[in-house]
Amino acid sequence: MSDPCIICVAITGSLPTKANNPAVPITVAEQVESTHEAFEAGASIVHGHVRNDDETPSSDPEKFARLKEGLEKHCPGMIIQFSTGGRSGAGHTRGGMLSLAPDMASLSVGSNNFPTRVYENPPDLVDWLASEMKAHDVKPEIEAFDLSHIFQAAKMHADGRIKDTPYVQFVMGVKNAMPVDRDVFDFYIKTVKRLFGEATPWCAAGIGARQSTLNDWAVSSGGHARTGLEDNVRLDRDTLAPSNAALVRRVVELCETYERPVATWTQARRILGLKEVAA
């Protein structure tokens, strides 16, 4: 298999704190430094959240603006993807940073259960977020926590609410949502190819201890992989990950095992249909 593999690094998220792992980057400066190291290790997409000084999640556009500025300066060419997830805010505040025109943003098109609450994505909010992404030329990454989310993304693409062919990410391993199941994973791939075309790129993310499992399945099946301290703070049961870069390097090793080159940022932009930029 010779197709390049895109590695996305989810650097911070909304939940992990330094008490969970001191390597979790909280401040914008820490996030930029951690991303730069992961970029050098092989990541071509950064999935970003921002935090308050007390480590609680934030949706402050000013923080996102400083993060974007730092990433563009220190990781030139890297694809910047912002989160519009529900843990950082409510309603339209979840998309307040989209006017900054990052390359990509996450888009959850349906609701589902999380460990202790319902992750609410009502249709009117989903439509508003999609319209903001379209207005600011931001490519959505569909976070599919359930099979129905893939079908909803296809419907939104067909009726024009999503402009380009969606980039679908399978999220597996969240407690009370979709477990890590190989038959389901394979059916996800089959469904994406049937709805969007055989050559459509897709990605997978595993939560917690199953991160490495999903990395392996994605790389070996011709997809793209997400890793990072947002989803998993450990290398194994007994070892904290020393950095986001360490988790990226683990995916790089899988790419070597399955004889897939790691996508450069220029290749990743081409694969995802994003605008070319000068480094």
Image: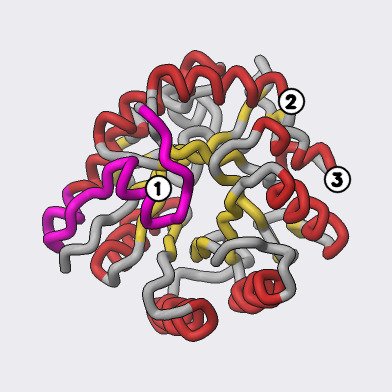
Instruction: Name the amino acid, label 3.
Output: Gly
User: Could you say whether the residue bearing mark 3 is in a helix, strand or loop?
Assistant: helix
Q: Is 226 positioned to the left or the right of 236 in the image? A: right
The image position of residue 274, as x and y in percent, is: 47, 48
Q: CA distance from mark 1 to mark 2?
A: 27 Å
Query: Which element type, helix, strand or loop, lies under badge 2?
Result: loop
Residue under the point 44% across and 18% down: 73
Q: Amino acid at mark 1?
A: Arg
Mark 3–mark 1 distance (CA, rounded to whole Å): 30 Å
Label ID, residue 91: 3
Magenta stretch: includes residue 263: yes
The residue that disc 2 covers is: 60
Picture coordinates of residue 90, whole percent (x, y): 83, 43
Identify the residue shown where x is 51% and y is 70%.
179
Quadrant hosting residue 23: top left
Residue sitting nearer the eye, 31 or 265: 265
Indicate the position of residue 128 as horizontal and vertical percent values.
Answer: 82, 53
Q: Quadrant of the N terminus?
A: bottom left
Alpha carbon separation for disc pair 2 and 3: 13 Å
Which is closer to the viewer, label 3 or label 1?
Answer: 1
Under mark 2, the amino acid is Asp
Of circles 1 and 2, which is in front? 1
Give the class, few, some or many, for how many residues have Cα within 10 Å of label 1's Cα (few <14, many ≥20): many
Q: Earlier in the sequence, mark 1 or mark 2?
A: 2
Q: Is residue 171 visible?
A: no
Q: Which residue is mark 1?
A: 269
Seen in the picture, residue 149 relative to 75 is either above or below; the reply is below
Label 3 crowd bin: few (<14), some (14–19), many (20+), radius 10 Å: some
Place residue 110 in its image quadrant: bottom right
Range covered by the magenta-colored residues? 253-278
| Of the pair 34 and 132, the residue shown nearer to us | 132
Question: Is residue 14 visible in the rendered structure shown here?
Answer: yes
